[in-house]
Image (cartoon, grey):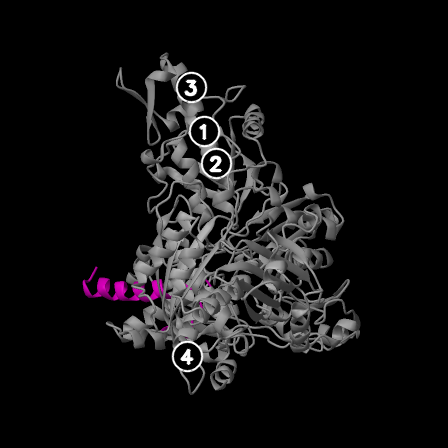
Amino acid sequence: MTDFPIKRRDFLVGVGVSGLGLVFGLDLQPAAGAEVAHEKETNAAGVKLPWARIAPDGAITIMAPAAEMGQGTMTALAMIVAEELDADWSKVTVEFSPADDAIYANPLPFFFGMMVTAASTAVMAYYKNMRLFGAQARRVLVGAAAAHLNVPASELTTEPSVVVHAKSGRRLSYGEIAGFATLPENMPTISEKDLKDPSQFRLIGHDIARVDIPGKTNGSTQYSIDVRLPDMVYATVVRAPVLGAAVLSVNDAEVAKMRDVLKVMQLPPDRVAVAARTYEAALAGERALKITWSKIAQSEFDSDRAMEQQSAMVRDLSKTGVVIQTDGDAAAAINGAAKVYKGEYHTEYVYHAQMEPLNSVSWVKDGGKSVEVWAGSQTPTHCVRSIAQALGIPAENVTLHRTFLGGGFGRRSAEDHDWAVDSALVSREMGKPVKVIWSRESDVRFGRFKPMTAQYLMAAEDKDGRLVAWHHRLVADEALSMTDPTRFEKGKEFPRISTTGIRTDYDFSNILVEAVRNKLGVRMSAVRGVGSTVNQFAAESFVDEIAFARGEDPVEMRLALLQKLPAEQETLRAVAAMAGWKKGEKAGRGVSFVTNAGTILATIAQVTVDRTTGAIRVPKIWIAADVGVAVLPRNIDGQLMSAAIHSLSNLLKERITFKNGEVQQSNFFDYPVIRMSEAPEVHTHIMPSTRNPVGIGDLGGIGVGPAVANGFYSATGKRLRVSPFLPERVLAVLKT
Amino acid sequence: MISLTVNKRSVQVDVDPSTPLLWVLREHLGLTGTKYGCGVAQCGACTVHLDGRPVRSCSTPMSRAAGKQVTTIEGVSTGGDHPVQRAWLEIEVPQCGYCQSGQIMSAVALLEKTPNPGEEDINRAMSGNICRCGTYPRIRRAIHRAAEMARAGA
């Protein structure tokens, strides 16, 4: 991924323009009692740039444009700036940037100039620009030092946070320079040739300690749920259990009389809020609500029936879809084939289950004309716009304080910010600061889910036994239509997130990959791994079926199909070596090979099956990953571990089902997720690489599902085709 | 008025005896390191110590906490230097971090009872704490490391 929609020139001009606005004495101070910065004038002098500022005492503050939800980019992105700035890392602190698309947008084209932290893109997207910015800031410091010392800039070098004039032995710290420097009217032009050679990296590729960890071991990290304001009240909000239903009646007068309940209010179109002096009173009020909802067509929705319907659709080849990948003529090759393989797979709705239930704090002021909001959002400018729209005020009257996220996984990226708008509306109603916390039950029932999918695959062999065709059909609703309608419309329905990772890398001469959208009227969202996890569960299970049917070793067959792709082959060989994979092994181990957006992953899983209970255990997973330059290796290992375990949890345990249009699950007892006793060891290997970094946090686990499915086949000779692999499904398959 | 001791300070709160300890700690006393995750003792994010034993504060009514000693993440050490916290830093356990106060409180309680835990001890003591980021393997390593540090008297 090397194309950036923002031209370097625009980026540098942008910095220069802000540089013209440089005013000594402007600094950012943390607001009392809140995590996020208020802009506030002080007398402290310093060089201030939109991405970083250097104070006369040498302290360097670098802006984090991306959300920090566990993936570590708050550290990784700042390291990239600090590397080229040649900053002393011990003097660097990182803070969340303001919500401002003009400066901090994710540069990848399919984010359309908006701040979005999603799809494993932060490091990949910002890498080049942040290096250029860091190098430019360094050039400014060197230039100022040259003028001050009255020597040519070419005689100056830098050591961490120091400009050195070797000839005279004079040294100026960055802090000293910040004390006298001004930004030049025209910022210096930096190109890629001005950047460090990777062999000179002091930070990138080294295991720097993540900046967010200390606060997360002593309870001091502030998530939005932790914000407390003077005179604040609490609220809970209940939504229509069936998307699109409306309130017909509610026992509001009765609930309003409960102890400490202040008000019960309807928020159009489909919400009822209970405001109270304490959160426990608001929750008690929520539980006492008796609401009658309108019956609509969606009230008939049943997810089991939908799975049957999708199965019929996916097998009906006359229902053609949007073409995602094509080469040659797959249909003709399949029709004329000596042998055709077929496989059908299904996946069910999946819930985010981020540990911090959705919540936000708002303080509507000036009689409803302005608002301060505390929220941990993956799309902070969407958050600002949504709240402005809900309150009917201009976006510039919304001040968003960005907080840490207690897990995002896509749930906190939704454009409409259903969960943040709640507190703004209730605050306006109450005339006070309000904290809204969704109960876990609300977080599940009004969740937005990874869509269920049906997948049908065909592959053809010619008379010489060569694999010559691949046809992959996907039936699914498209979650981006609800997660981010602005992007969905601007991109004319591309990108789709249901189809990520569906392209095949294998060397078939005839390929057709198509996606049929099936609108099901259910709340949907991007969920970690988006389409990749489910599409690759199907595709890589199917490749395994073919390998076993042909009597080939699944690693060998994949290597042969990847013959034109050496980096991909190397990654697969690396995982086989790490796991000690033996040709033709029958040890209950399965393999998968997947790529998405430049990330290459080869995975092996060890699987054991309890044939009495149907329980699957996965004691070990091995992953080899090529992610380009590994900016923060220990964190990449952590992300691979995290994504692998998350994927495994999805695969073995998790599903949301619907009856009468309503979600059937409500909390962790009926939506179980993986726990300590079930967690596998995860062994990782990061491939050495010099290409630009690609993503890992969202994607690292996408090979786990098929590796486990294939390991199950290796252990039992049976094929699991429907995820999750619930014990009753395992027992049923074992009986066949 | 209900009296109890929180992190060695005696406090009095005026709440209904059925109020969960969690909300008193977080919203009445401002000790927000203890987290709300499920409200039904399923996830462990709210784990604190009641007279030294780990409990889920979301399902512990104030009537049960009355007169007792409560320790939260804020009181488990001075300056975050409990061996478990230092091991958490060294192994770099947290990701989103939201569940980690609860994980640490469960791990501290485990090591107080079982200074040299085996894998099954860890499974038993820690399986009530969900980590959606899947940091379990690092939690396991960090518990062993903390045990080592505590043995070395470090």
For mark 2, give the secondary structure: helix
Which picture quadrant has residue A104? top right
The range drawn in magenta is: B126-154
For mark 4, what is the residue? A716
Query: How many residues crowd around disc 4 within 10 Å: few (fewer than 14), some, or many (20 or more)?
Result: some
Q: Determine whether A60 is above or below A155 in the image.
A: below
Q: Is residue A558 magenta?
A: no
Outermost left residue: B152
Between A224 and A704, the one nearer to me in the picture = A704
- Three-letter code for the amino acid on which mark 1 is drawn: Glu
Q: Position of residue A716 (x, y in %)?
A: 41, 79
Q: Are marks 2 and 3 in contact (CB under 8 Å)?
A: no
Decide which of B145, A555 is in the foreground and name it: A555
Tag 1's secondary structure? helix
Local SS, label 3: helix
Q: Earlier in the sequence, mark 3 or mark 1?
A: 3
For the residues carrying marks 2 and 4, which lies nearer the camera in this image?
4
Give the label on residue A143, or none: 3
Measure the C-alpha gap from mark 2 to mark 4: 48 Å
Q: Which of labels 2 and 3 is toward the front?
A: 2
- The residue indicated by pointer 2 is A128
Callout 4 touching callout 1 (CB < 8 Å): no
Q: Secondary structure at mark 4?
A: helix
